[in-house]
Image: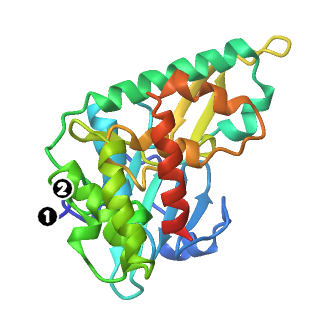
Amino acid sequence: MASTLELPYYATDLPSPLPTEADIDAAPDITLAYGGRRVVEIGTHYVVKYGRGVNLIEGENMLYVGKNTSIPVPRVYALYSNSETRKSYIVMERVAGQTLLSLWPELSHSKKETVAATLQSYFNELRQLPSPGYYGSLGKRYLCDDIFRTIESNPEINGPFTSHETLVEALALKYTYDGRPIFRADFYRQCLPRLLHSNGSIFTHGDFQRKNIMVQRNGDSTGDEPGQLQVVVIDWEKSGWYPCYWEYFYAVCALRWDDDWCLWLERMLEPYVGESAWFKALHLELWS
């Protein structure tokens, strides 16, 4: 199925004229370039994610979440592609503040509780979005998580999936697609259906890490206590309808184990502790 909105997309209420492609190419990077993607900052209003590796579904996800929930996400100002350079562009709001990764060590226990409660409310709201009856991206398209990626299109591995059983089978298919032993793939076929269960798909951010949470401090600060915190979720690249355990699994896979963040996950996400150990091992194999 095609895009959920007509592309190219341009918002009408811009804070300033959109940057040109020359402006974007000359802008400073916010993060290291990766996988055919750059993320750059332009002035006080814009951040642009662009390149041959950029999927405009990310911008559609932000528009969808912004329209259908109260979760703060960056505003999307433009979505377009250049057919000559084969680069795609997501022009979005520049969100001021710190990442939760950099801010977390500075927060008191009470402020950590506030952030955790806020994020729990966000994820609860995501789960209330109606399921479309499949596992996939907006518009009944393939899942954007790299674990389902193939060089050529292969719906049996990429999705969308009409059932949880076909999604689990896709993990085994991806294992042999990558040239790994068929006997181990068959072992996963044997045990994963006993371990992984999902009663329908739920909308999932797909990359819940502190680096993807921006925190703005509002109001005055007193002592070591920052003022009121505004929490904004960024990087909706992998979002879509996944099994209920997916968000927790990826949050565990991303743990650094160097502070107490791991102890707060259950405050924000429904835990799937035993299953996540199996998934982490499979994830590492499919990503290696």
Residue lying at 59% horizontally and 59% vertically, measured from the top left: 42
* x, y percent for residue 62: 37, 46
Query: For the point 55% across and 48% down, which residue is it?
Result: 45
Q: Nearer the viewer, residue 174 or 205?
A: 174
Give the x, y percent position of residue 66: 34, 37
Residue 47 seen in the current view: yes
Q: Residues within 10 Å of mark 2 (few under 14, many from 20)?
A: some
**Element type at mark 2:** loop
Disc marking residue 1: 1
Element type at mark 1: loop
Q: Is residue 118 left or right of residue 218?
A: left
Tag 1: amino acid: Met
> Which comes sooner in the sequence, label 2 or label 1?
1
Label 2 – label 1 distance at C-alpha: 6 Å
Kindly identify the residue that appears in the image at 66 percent across and 36 percent down: 100
Q: Report which residue position mark 2 lands on.
A: 139
Image coords of residue 86 (percent x, y): 39, 83
Q: Looking at the picture, does residue 199 appear above or below residue 167? A: above
- Residue type at tag 2: Gly
Q: Is residue 98 in sight in this rendering? A: no
Q: Is the C terminus in the top left, top right, bottom left or bottom right quadrant?
A: bottom right
Drawn side of residue 72 relative to residue 220, left or right: left
Q: Position of residue 126 (x, y in %)?
A: 34, 32
